[in-house]
Image (cartoon, rainbow, N blue to C red):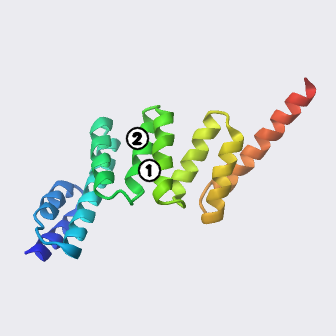
Amino acid sequence: RDVVHLLRGELALQKPDGCLEAVDSFGKVRGAGRRRDAAVEGLARAHNIKGIHLARGGRTHEALFMLKKSSDLLPAWAAPRVNMGMVFQAMGKQDKAAREYGRALEVEPDSATALFNLGKLHVQKGELDLAAGYYRRLLEYHPYFPGVRAALAELVRRREELGKTHSRD
C-alpha cells in the first residue's frame, strides 16, 4: 500500500493544483526506511510547491508557513529557504531575506539563486564589496549563470564612479 501512496503522491505533484492531494497521499505512508524517507521528501516538495503558489497569489504569510513546514521536514534541502528569502524580499524585509538565503547556503553552499539574490540585496544596501563577493562566488560554482557577469560589471563600473567622485572631493 505504501508504494501506491507514494505513486499517487508523485502523480499529484505533476498536477497544477495537486499539492494537497500529494500531501494526503504521502501522509498515508506508514512504512519505515526508504519508503518513509521518500514520503517525507514528497511532503517537503508538496509544501514547497504550495508555498510558491501561495506567494504568487499574494498570500505571503500562508506561503511562509508552508515553506517553513517544507524546511522543517527536509532541513538539508535549500529550496524552501531560498523561496522564503524571495518571499521576504518581496515583502520588503531585506534582513529576513538575507538570513534565509544564508541558511540556504549553510546546507547548499553553491545555491545559485541564494548567492545571486544575496548579491542583489547587498547592492541595494550599497554594500558593493559584499555584493561582489557573492557574485564572484556564484561565478566559481556556476560560470554561466544568467546575469551574474553583467551584475559584476555594473558593480565595477559603480565602484569606479564612486572612486572618481571621492577623488574630486
**The residue tagged with tag 1: helix, strand or loop?**
helix
Tell me, for residue 69, which label it has, or none. none
Left or right of 76, for residue 36: left
As drawn, the label of residue 82 is: 1
Report the front residue among 169 and 161. 169
Which percent across, then down, holds residue 46? 25, 57
* 41 or 151, nearer to the observer: 41
> Is label 2 or label 1 in front?
1
**Residue 33 at x, y = what percent?**
21, 74
- Alpha-carbon distance for marks 2 and 1? 9 Å
Horizontally, is 15 left or right of 158 in the view? Answer: left
Q: Quadrant of residue 87?
A: top left
Q: Amino acid at mark 2?
A: Val
Q: Residue at x 17, y 54 (%)?
A: 20
x then y, percent, for residue 165: 86, 29
Q: Residue at x 42, y 33 (%)?
A: 91
Residue 11 in view (yes/no): yes
Q: Quadrant of the N terminus?
A: bottom left
Q: Where in the figure is residue 22, as x and y percent of width and height?
A: 18, 61
The residue singled out by tag 2 in the image is: 87
Q: Say whether disc 2 or disc 1 marks the residue closer to the N-terminus.
A: 1
User: For the residue carrying disc 1, how many other residues have a C-alpha within 10 Å: few (<14), some (14-19), or many (20+)?
Assistant: many
Residue shown at 48% from the left, 42% from the top = 99
Closer-to-camera residue (125/59)? 125
- Disc 1 marks which amino acid? Val
Taking the view exactly as shown, the residue that stands out farthest to the top is: 169
Can residue 143 be seen in the rendering of this structure?
A: no
Q: Is residue 60 above or below residue 145?
A: above
Q: Of all residues shown, which one is farthest toward the right?
A: 168
